Image (spheres, rainbow, N blue to C red):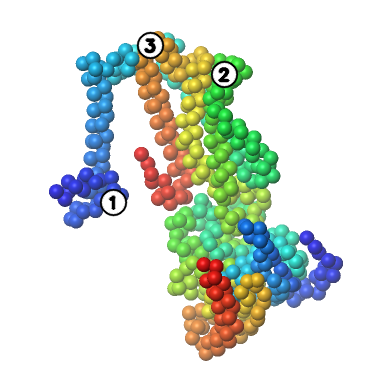
C-alpha cells in the first residue's frame, strides 16, 4: 500500500469534477502456476458525477478487474483509485455492484433478497421490508415476493439483483456484464429498465460489457480497452439524445456512425484476443 | 406385452408408453414396487422361520422370527433384565441425542471458524487429521474410566463420533461458498459477522445437513458401543446381556428396536432438512430410498 502525499493533496481539486478517478492504475495477479499476469496496465479514467460510462473490450482485457478495483474488493498493484474524491480503502457504502453471474442469495426469497442491503446497514426490519416491497414493485416483481430465486427466470433474477443494488441508493454503480446471460429480447427490456432506474437515481455508472451495441445505446461515454493487459485505447463521447429507447436507438443514423467508428478501434483488439485463445487451445 | 415389459423395466427414470397416461403408469409402478417389497420381506422372514422349523437353520445360534417377536412382547409386557423396555430405549436415546447435539454444535462452530480462518486452519490442520485417523470407538474405555458408567461417558463417545463428520462437512461447506455471493454481500454492506451468519452459514447448511444423516446413526453407534463397554442401562446393555446368555432372539429383538429408533430419527432429520432447505430446487435431493 503506497499513498504518496502528492496524490493526497490533489484530492481537494478533483472532488468536484470526478466521481471516479483511476490514475495510472496497474493490477498484476499471480496465476495458479506462479506466473505474474498483468490484467490492466496504466489505466487512467475519469467518470463525472451522474455520468454513464461503458467500458468495452475483448475477453480477458481486465474489464472486471477494473470494477473490482473501483469497488474496493481488490487493491491496485500500482497507481491510485479515487471514489468521490477519496482514495479507495475498503468497500465504500456509496457503491453498488451488479455482478455478471447470479449473486442473489438462493436461500432468501425475493423480498428478503432485496431487503438484504438495508438490513446489513442496520435499518430496522419492518422498515427495511417496507422499503424492499417498494423496490420489488419498481422492478415489476409484485406478486413474486415469496418466490425463491430458483423459481424465477433469468430476467426476473436480474431484476431482483437490480432492486437489491438500487435500494441502497448508490452514488456509484458498477455493472459487470449484468445482462450477458439473458436472451436478446429480455436483455433489451432490462436495458430500458436500467436507464429508467438510473435516470431517477442520477448515479455515476461504470458498465462493463463486450457488446458494443449495448455500450453505445446505454452510455454517455464509451471507453475501449485493448486486449490484455488492458490499457485505454480510446474514449468516445456518445452524443445521442436522452431519454433513449434501447430497441429503437439502434436504427438511428448517428448510432450506426458511432458504432462503425468505435468498432474500427475495437476490432483489432478482438482479433488479437481471438488469435491468442486459438494459440492456447 | 407392451404393458408388461413396461412394468418390468419400471426402474427406469420415466417409463413412457404409447396410449397409457403418465399418471396411470406411475401409479402402476408404485403398486408393483410396494408389492414386491412386501413379497421380499415375506420370503426372507418366512424362509428364515421355515428353515428353523424344519431344522435347516439352528435357532439356538441364529434365532427365529417368531421367537424374536415373542421376546419383544415379553420385554414390552414384563420388562428386560435391566428394567422396563421403554426405560432402556429412553436411556439410549438420551445418550444418542445428547451426543448428537454436542457433536453437531461443536462441529459446526469449529468448522465455520477454521473454514473462515486460513491461519488457524493451517496450524490445527495436521492435528485434526491425526485425531480423525484414530478409530474413535477405541476412546470408549477412556471415557468409561474418566466419566464413569453413567450416561456421560456414552454422550462423550457419541459426541466425538459426530463431531468429526459434522466438522469436516461444515469446513468444506464454508470453503465452497460462492465467491460472488461473498462479494455481493460485502458490497451490500455486510460486516464480517454478518458475512458469517447471513451468507456463510446458510450456504454451508446444505453440507452440514447432509452430514446430519450419517452423524445421527454414528451417535447411535457411540451410545450402544459405550453401553457395551460398560453401562448400567440402555439397549446396548440389553444386547450385551442377551449375547452373554446365548439368547440370539434377544440380540435380534434389540437390533430390531434400534432399527426402528434409527428409522424414526432419520425421518426427523429428513423433515428438518426439508424445512431448512426449502429454498432449494427439488431436483437436488430426489434420491430417496
Label 1 sits on residue: B14
- Are the numbered discs 1 and 3 placed on the same chain, yes or no? yes
Label 3 sits on residue: B246
Distance, label 3 to label 2, CA atoms, is 24 Å
Q: Residues within 10 Å of mark 1 (few under 14, many from 20)?
A: few
Q: Whole-percent x and y of residue B32?
A: 23, 40
**Tag 1, which chain?**
B
Q: Nearer the viewer, mark 1 or mark 3?
A: 3
- Name above or below for residue B214 compared with residue B178: above
- In the image, A104 versus B227, the foreground residue is B227
N-term mark: 1 or 3: 1
Distance, label 1 to label 2, CA atoms, is 52 Å
N-term mark: 3 or 2: 2
- Residue drawn at 65 percent across, 81 percent down: A234
- Are the numbered discs 1 and 2 placed on the same chain, yes or no? yes
Distance, label 1 to label 3, CA atoms, is 50 Å
Q: Whole-percent x and y of residue B90?
A: 46, 21
Provide the secondary structure element on which disc 3 rests: loop
- Residue drawn at 29 percent across, 19 percent down: B65
- Residue drawn at 23 percent across, 32 percent down: B39
- In the image, B125 versus A254, the foreground residue is B125
Provide the secondary structure element on which disc 1 rests: loop
Label 2 sits on residue: B141
- Residue A21 in view (yes/no): no
**Tag 2, which chain?**
B
Amino acid at each position: 500500500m503506497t499513498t504518496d502525499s502528492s496524490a493526497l493533496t490533489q484530492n481537494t481539486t478533483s472532488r468536484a469534477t470526478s466521481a471516479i478517478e483511476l490514475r495510472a492504475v496497474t493490477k498484476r495477479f499471480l496465476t495458479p502456476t506462479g506466473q505474474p499476469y498483468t490484467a490492466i496496465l496504466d489505466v487512467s479514467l475519469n467518470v463525472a458525477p451522474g455520468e454513464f460510462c461503458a467500458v468495452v473490450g475483448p475477453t480477458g482485457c481486465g474489464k472486471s478487474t477494473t470494477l473490482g478495483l473501483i469497488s474496493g474488493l481488490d487493491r491496485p498493484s500500482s497507481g491510485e483509485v479515487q471514489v468521490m474524491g477519496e482514495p479507495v480503502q475498503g468497500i465504500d457504502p456509496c457503491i453498488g455492484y451488479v455482478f455478471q453471474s447470479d449473486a442473489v442469495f438462493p436461500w432468501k426469497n425475493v423480498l428478503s433478497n432485496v431487503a438484504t442491503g438495508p438490513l446489513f446497514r442496520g435499518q430496522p426490519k419492518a422498515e427495511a421490508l417496507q422499503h424492499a416491497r417498494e423496490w420489488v414493485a419498481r422492478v415489476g416483481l409484485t406478486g413474486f415476493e415469496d418466490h425463491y430465486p430458483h423459481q424465477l427466470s433469468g430476467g426476473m433474477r436480474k431484476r431482483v439483483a437490480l432492486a437489491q443494488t438500487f435500494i441502497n441508493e448508490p452514488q456509484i454503480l458498477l455493472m459487470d456484464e449484468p445482462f450477458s446471460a439473458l436472451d436478446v429480447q429480455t436483455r433489451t427490456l432490462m436495458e430500458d429498465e436500467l436507464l429508467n432506474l438510473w435516470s431517477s437515481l442520477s448515479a455515476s455508472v461504470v458498465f462493463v460489457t463486450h457488446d458494443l451495441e449495448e455500450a453505445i445505446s446505454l452510455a454517455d461515454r464509451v471507453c475501449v480497452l485493448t486486449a490484455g493487459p488492458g490499457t485505454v485505447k480510446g474514449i468516445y463521447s456518445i452524443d445521442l439524445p436522452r431519454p433513449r429507447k434501447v430497441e429503437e436507438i439502434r436504427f438511428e443514423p448517428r448510432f450506426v456512425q458511432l458504432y462503425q467508428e468505435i468498432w474500427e478501434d475495437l476490432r483489432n483488439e478482438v482479433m488479437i484476443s481471438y488469435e491468442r485463445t486459438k494459440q492456447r487451445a | 406385452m407392451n404393458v408388461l415389459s413396461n412394468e418390468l423395466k419400471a426402474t427406469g427414470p420415466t417409463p413412457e408408453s404409447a396410449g397409457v397416461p403418465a399418471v396411470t403408469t406411475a401409479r402402476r409402478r408404485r403398486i408393483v414396487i410396494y408389492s414386491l417389497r412386501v413379497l421380499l420381506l415375506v420370503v426372507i422372514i418366512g424362509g428364515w422361520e421355515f428353515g428353523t422349523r424344519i431344522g435347516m437353520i439352528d435357532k439356538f445360534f441364529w434365532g427365529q422370527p417368531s421367537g424374536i417377536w415373542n421376546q419383544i412382547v415379553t420385554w414390552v409386557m414384563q420388562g428386560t433384565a435391566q428394567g422396563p423396555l421403554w426405560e432402556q430405549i429412553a436411556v439410549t436415546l438420551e445418550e444418542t441425542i445428547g451426543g448428537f447435539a454436542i457433536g453437531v454444535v461443536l462441529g459446526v462452530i469449529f468448522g465455520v471458524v477454521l473454514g473462515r480462518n486460513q491461519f488457524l486452519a493451517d496450524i490445527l490442520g495436521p492435528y485434526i487429521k491425526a485425531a480423525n485417523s484414530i478409530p474413535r470407538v477405541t476412546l470408549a474405555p477412556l471415557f468409561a474410566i474418566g466419566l464413569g458408567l453413567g450416561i456421560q461417558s456414552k454422550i462423550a463417545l457419541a459426541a466425538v463420533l459426530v463431531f468429526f463428520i459434522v466438522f469436516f462437512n461444515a469446513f468444506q461447506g464454508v470453503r465452497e461458498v460462492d465467491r460472488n455471493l461473498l462479494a455481493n454481500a460485502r458490497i451490500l454492506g455486510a460486516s464480517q459477522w454478518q458475512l458469517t451468519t447471513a451468507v456463510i452459514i446458510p450456504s454451508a447448511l446444505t453440507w452440514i445437513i447432509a452430514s446430519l444423516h450419517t452423524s445421527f446413526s454414528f451417535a447411535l453407534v457411540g451410545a450402544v458401543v459405550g453401553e457395551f463397554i460398560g453401562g448400567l442401562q440402555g439397549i446396548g446393555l440389553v444386547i450385551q446381556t442377551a449375547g452373554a446368555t446365548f439368547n440370539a432372539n434377544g440380540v435380534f429383538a434389540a437390533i430390531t428396536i434400534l432399527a426402528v429408533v434409527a428409522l424414526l430419527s432419520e425421518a426427523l432429520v429428513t423433515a428438518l432438512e426439508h424445512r431448512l432447505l426449502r429454498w432449494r430446487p427439488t431436483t437436488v435431493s430426489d434420491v430417496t430410498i
